[in-house]
Image (cartoon, helix red, strand yellow):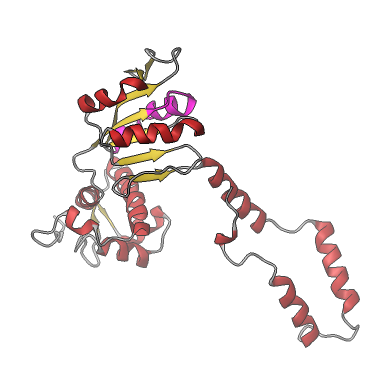
Amino acid sequence: MTEQHEAPSGVSGRALQKDIPQATVARLATYLRVLAMLADDGVAIVSSEELAVAAGVNSAKLRKDLSFLGPNGVRGVGYDVAKLRTRIEDVLGLSQGHRVVLVGAGNLGRALVGYGGFRRRGFTVVGMFDSHPEVIGRSVAGLVVGDVADLAPAIDVLKPTIAVITVPDDAAQDVCDLLVASGLQSILSFAPCELTAPETVEVRRVDLAVELQMLSFETARNAPPLPEVAHAVSGRIAHRAPAHTAAGHPALKHSTSSHSATEPSSKGSVVTP
């Protein structure tokens, strides 16, 4: 039996949550996904190197992230998959599971409700609502679509902890206001607009267009130059430089420096819509 250090006595996941950076929280969710896959494959112990590779980070960053959870592994042995998984679930607030309501029964909403991965990760969709008469009353993945006009009393009965908005842009703020008035404090929105909510309400936005733009930017930045562009640039350098200029000549260094200065210096240079 492999020895496994537990978190310090009296320190709960909730007590640790305040000290964990947001970037670390995002990676903890990735580690949890990997640990779930390892558990499904019957793996009992995993090293930091193996877990880091599977999660796409370096082992030093992984160990630093996991240090926020308290002592978890044994040097030279690794992490107990089941115990580390439980620990991360506790810190992420997943131990008791979450009940989710979704507003918007369009194509995206129906796809999200039909995704079985949510339940496996502790999220159960307990209600789905829409305002379109042709949609209300239909069955989607075992749920009957309710009228959004009945959302407030339904929330009192369903007791959700998270709401998901998948309605058009022009209706998103009204739905958000209704959810806030009904007591929801955690909202995930797929609407492209920014939503206004009290500071006590956590609103996260998933903008698929922005994500595609980021991918477009990375693709353009990493793509090799077109042959005609590369030929034109090399031709201008050859025309400007004296025939006897060597690779180490200051004139060529200046030309190279000026060209590279026009390159994007960071991922943050992408323009949002």
| Between 162 and 24, the one nearer to me in the picture | 162
- Where does the magenta region start and end? 103-121
Residue at (26% x, 23% y) in the render: 154
| Between 228 and 1, the one nearer to me in the picture | 228
Q: Position of residue 32 (x, y in %)?
A: 31, 48
Q: Quadrant of residue 129?
A: top left
The quadrant the N terminus occupies is bottom left
Q: Quadrant of residue 120?
A: top left
Residue at (90% x, 83% y) in the render: 242
Above or below 124: residue 90: below
Magenta stretch contains residue 158: no
Furthest residue to the left? 9
| Between 240 and 2, the one nearer to me in the picture | 240
Q: Position of residue 261 (x, y in %)?
A: 68, 72
Q: Position of residue 215 (x, y in %)?
A: 58, 49
Q: Position of residue 27 (x, y in %)?
A: 36, 55
Describe residue 22's horizontal placement relative to residue 97 as left or right: right
Residue at (62% x, 53% y) in the render: 217
Total numbered circles: 0
Describe residue 69's horizontal placement relative to residue 221 as left or right: left
Magenta stretch contains residue 117: yes
Above or below 144: residue 47: below
